Image (cartoon, coloured by chain):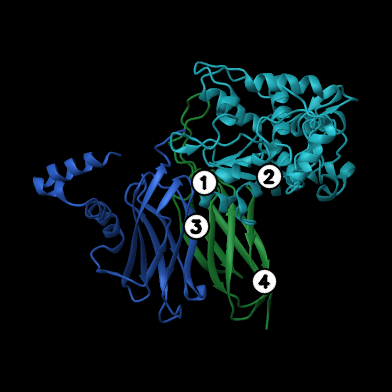
Chain colours: A cyan, B blue, C green
Amino acid sequence: MTRSPAIGAAALALALGAAVLPSGAAAQARPIPPDQVRSGVTFLAPDQRALQQDAFGNPGLLWVERGERLWREPAGAGGKSCANCHGDGAASMKGVAARYPVFDTKAGRLFNLEGRINECRTAHQGATPFPYESEALLSLTAYVAHQSRGMPLAVAIDGPARKHFESGEKLYTQRRGQLNLSCAQCHTDNWGRKLGPEPISQGHPNAYPLYRLEWQTLGSLQRRFRSCLSGIRAEMLPYGSPEYLDLELYVAWRAAGLEIETPGVRR
Amino acid sequence: MKRPGRRRFLAGATGALALAALPESVLAQAAIDPVIQGVVRGAPVKRGRVKLDLPELADNGNSVPVKVTVESPMTAADHVRAIHFLSERNPERNVATFQFGARAGRAEIVTRVRLAGSQRVVALAELSDGSFWMDAAEIVVTLSACIDES
Amino acid sequence: MAARIQIPAAAKRGEVIEVRILIQHPMETGYRVDHVGKPVPKNAIRTLTCRYNGVEILRAAMSPGIAANPYLQFCTVAEASGELEFSWTDDAGTQESARQPIVVSG
């Protein structure tokens, strides 16, 4: 893959009106050109789009509200709440989701939001971690991500994150399952075309956790990965697998510049 | 729920093969009439005064927005007592009933329903004088609630 | 269970206002199966009432035909300041409620 000079690519990105990409990302050609990157919301039927944009009635907001209550609830051995360290979430969490997943040099590993919340619970609150898809973890993740609503995704893929990015990219482009399909074949090569009656989206994570009509509840990005894997008759790895984390980093980079919409609504 | 199956059933049940030639909307009304009768119990039902707002096409039957408005002064003497939302095909045909009083100000309800397939739906208003008024709509549902498991 | 209620921040006596509620409830149809194939039992909110300063202004009989995480919007005449109280019961017998203060001037 030819790599344009970092300055040239950044200037091109600015000229196209896209957000300036973080270091490292500018040197890497995006599989979907920045001027064609579209959020999943643009593939929705009007009624479902209206549901996401309903400032009161978006079902995902129920979890955001619950998350706000949990934020202030004391937990664990020390009886500390998130608010005790982080204060008002609306202020302190602004912009956080936009740069996740992120490599934490102190902990020496990659974190998604769920992982960071659980790390705080175990390391700082003396509390037990929340399982994936639990009401508590969904609510807190939704609450934190919601504070970055409207902000463009901008993850770092350089330095220690680089190997995770490359692993994620490999996972994304590798055929798998009985149907022998890769993520890229649908979401990069055939987005916009129909799979049955439904249009194929570009597979971006910018609205997660989101309310899926099929699930009739809020769900995480990893739940969506597992659904896709099931759909192509591939093995579903357990929640929290390192492969999913690498994939989350890759898809976040792939969606760079898209605004966070959490809580999204999808079919 | 197969449409040809219903035609055959109705044709067989009445022994009249001529039924099979009737348009779909007539059969849909025939299918929902018993549900209406379950509410009105023989009382006459007039068309009008009720406005049922429903999309013509729902991509996903799991959440379909619906609005029912009834023309009424909403006074103690003359108001809408209840709005019934009825389905031709859902497992539970009486989807919901909303009871109001004169304090409602406006006879209106907005909600989101599940629709188990393309069908006719009816909004039935029960007035304080005991009369019934209705509006009906046909909707095409691409992905049926309850039936289509993704 | 969480619920969100929305009414105008301030209303004038005699004004017809819109009341909106969004309730967190799966409204289980009884047709779904869980991840290991076990059927999820039917469990939907069946009755819901709204009282305005103790007087019932809405009574709803619902079914799984109402979409998950039910949304309702209806009207009422703003009469006096006080409270709107919603209560609802589901098939499992769980009773819940949510309150919203209402401010009416004039």
> Alpha-carbon distance for marks 1 and 3?
23 Å
The quadrant holding residue B78 is bottom left
Are labels 1 and 2 on one chain?
A: no
- Which one is in front in this view, the residue at disc 1 or the one at disc 4? 4
Residue beneath the point at 37% across and 67% down: B125
The quarter of the picture where the N terminus of chain A appears is top right
Q: Secondary structure at mark 2?
A: loop
Residue type marked 3: Thr
The quadrant holding residue A36 is top right
Q: Are marks 4 and 2 in contact (CB under 8 Å)?
A: no
Q: Which residue is mark 4?
A: C82
Q: Which mark is residue C93?
A: 1
Which chain is mark 4 on?
C
Q: Which mark is residue B111?
A: 3
- Evaluate whether residue B131 shows in this view: yes
Q: How would you rate the neighbour count of disc 3 (Cα within 10 Å): few for under 14, some for 14-19, many for 20 or more?
A: many
> Alpha-carbon distance for marks 1 and 4?
29 Å
Q: Nearer the viewer, residue A143 or B84?
A: A143
- Which one is in front in this view, the residue at disc 2 or the one at disc 3? 2
Q: Secondary structure at mark 4?
A: strand
Q: Nearer the viewer, residue A53 or B72?
A: A53
**Residue B43 located left or right of residue B113:** left
Query: Where residue C86 appears, x then y in whole percent?
Result: 58, 60
Residue type marked 2: Thr
- Which one is in front in this view, the residue at disc 1 or the one at disc 3? 3
Which chain is mark 3 on?
B
> Alpha-carbon distance for marks 4 and 2?
34 Å
Which chain is mark 2 on?
A
Query: Where residue A212 appears, x then y in whole percent?
Result: 56, 40
> Alpha-carbon distance for marks 2 and 3?
23 Å
Q: Are marks 1 and 3 in contact (CB under 8 Å)?
A: no
Q: Which residue is mark 2?
A: A262
